[in-house]
Image (spheres, grey):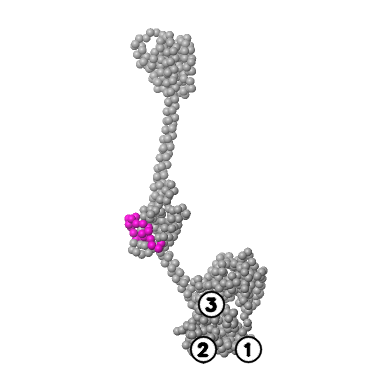
Amino acid sequence: MNDLLTSRAHGSVREASVPARASILMVDDKPARLLTYEAILNGLEVNCVRALSGTEALEKLMSQEFAVILLDVQMPDIDGFEVARLVRQHPRLERVPIIFVTGINVGQSDILRGYEVGAIDYIAVPVVPEILRSKVAVLVELHQRRAELQRVNVDLAAARAQLDDELRRDTADHRRTEAALRDSERVFKALVEHATVGVARNSLDGRFLYVNPGFCQMLGYSAEELVQMTWQQITHPDDIDADVQYAKRVVAGEAPSYTLEKRYIRKDGSIVWVSLHGSIVKDDEDKPRTGMAVVVDITERRVADEMLRTADRRKDEFLAMLAHELRNPVAPILSVAEALTHMLGRDERQQALVGIVQRQASHLSRLLDDLLDVARITQGRIELQREQVSLTDCVAVACESVEPLIRARRQTLRVEHEQPLFLHADRVRIAQCIGNLLSNAAKYSDAGTEIFLRTWRDEDQAVLTVRDDGAGIAADFLPHVFDLFAQGERGLDRSQGGLGIGLTVTRKLVQLHGGEIEAASDGPGRGATFTLRLPASAQRADLPASPPAASGLRRILIIDDNRDAADSMAVLLQLDGHEVAAVYSPEDGIAKVSVFAPDIVLLDIGLPFMDGYAVARRLKDDGFQGRLIAISGYGEEDDKQRATAAGFFAHLSKPVEYSALKKVMAAPPAGFPPENH
């Protein structure tokens, strides 16, 4: 029987789950008794299962679960004691309560034997229904509670297993996170500790919390020394406020970070220039916690920048001095060429040679003007003489200036004005810009071609375009066309000439007027278009009336230490019928005035020992009432203002154009002040 029970346990019979209604196993070889038990238990909502023998009972026990076993003691095949013993030996059944039901008198030894084999109670036949029902009810309730407790334990075990699994995963994730963090720390340490730049972390009040070796090397302090200091202690006093203001903006959330150039004071007292990038580290509540700084030593770069600025300044000074010095020899060349045009006869070859001298000297003069303008602009010494001017008049002046070049190249200039336009601008400088564009178009266009100039109004802007069908501009050179000394590809004959500074000067002058200029071209051989935009003025220009013509010959004294310049100008004036005297020192000039009594004195400013301003003051003090005209290689605005303050009637820059000189000499003394050149 024991083998039967064991085989059934290991066989195909499965353990049943606890049913919703508890089951009662009733075992008795008398069917009538089983019916009685079932009737008594009818109101308990239990399933009553019958077994007529011990063997059948064991089979029932292996197939399902029971809350209570009502077991008859006396049965033919296996008695109740043996059945109870076998049940108690099975692990799954050892806790099932067994109540012996017997119809014979049992002694104390039988009762003890029953308890020994696992019975929990005895009920004698005839059975008292209330007793049987109450005992079974209690055991059924205990069974159900135990089953519920088992289910809870199963759920708890499953939950614990899930928690254990999650804990294992969390532990693994935590270990991986820790490993990644350690790896990240190693990488960070390797980067920061061996970085060639300085890295520092400080508290919000400025105390250093960490500095890397690069920062220490930059400042000459050890890490131990720096963590006892604040960044304010090592910052140049003049740079602290700027750093504080930038940092406050970042702390306030107005900016994520900041960059500035500042000075640190090294331990040895020397200065190190740095570029500092500062930021803030925040805590979990998004509040500023510490400051971080990445610092790069830029001392060498600052020194190099200063050297470049010094070299650039010296270059500008050299260009200005070069242009000034070259003006002196050009002036007599122009004067002699002008004089020769009056002195020579009608010999075409001689006139052609003189024309060559005039054109080349004038060209050299324009180059010198460009060099001076570049120097003035880069040094910020250009002052615009703004007035209400007509753009049409500026175009006319520009066209007149380039007319010889266009005529020599047999080109045609077509000008179109859609409407009168007026500017609040410097008349001379605007005409210079337009002239540069026209000259550039003429030089880079073939002989016999046309150049087009057009003006119109675009909202509040006056627009001027100069278009040609000439050499064009390569796409890669177009962005650099306004750069200083920039020139496109040129042939070995350098037929276009120039220094590559005219367009640079033009752009700078246009920008000073609040305008803009741009170049466009479809490529080499397809011409170019330059577009100039300037703020238009709604007010019409008040043009001065023409001064009355002055006639008559003058007594003119020239004071210039450059004998060639003085003598050539004297000859030129004499050819026009004037009475002219030339002296070559300030002392001789002052003495000559008293005996020659000139109407006009052409006075060089750059005289040795006593400059032209001092000579002018001496002449005024001596009672000279004639017209003083300054002749100078310097043409800055302050030079002109200084000349006016010294009593000069006009200021002319070398080389002096004879037409400009005649205009100044012919101007009346009042009402029509001459235009300085």
Distance from disc 3 to disc 2, alpha carbons, whole Å, reads: 33 Å
Amino acid type, label 1: Gly
Q: Earlier in the sequence, mark 2 or mark 1?
A: 1
Task: From the image, state whether disc 3 or disc 2 is nearer to you.
Answer: 2
Amino acid type, label 3: Leu
Residue identified by numbered label 2: 593
Residue identified by numbered label 3: 368
**Residue 663 location (% of width, % of height):** 59, 82
Q: What range of the chain is rendered magenta?
A: 217-239
Residue identified by numbered label 1: 345
Q: Secondary structure at mark 3?
A: helix
Q: Secondary structure at mark 1?
A: loop
Residue 149's place in the image compared with 634, above or below, is: above
Distance from disc 2 to disc 1, alpha carbons, whole Å, reads: 35 Å
Q: Is residue 229 magenta?
A: yes
Q: Main secondary structure of the magenta part?
A: helix
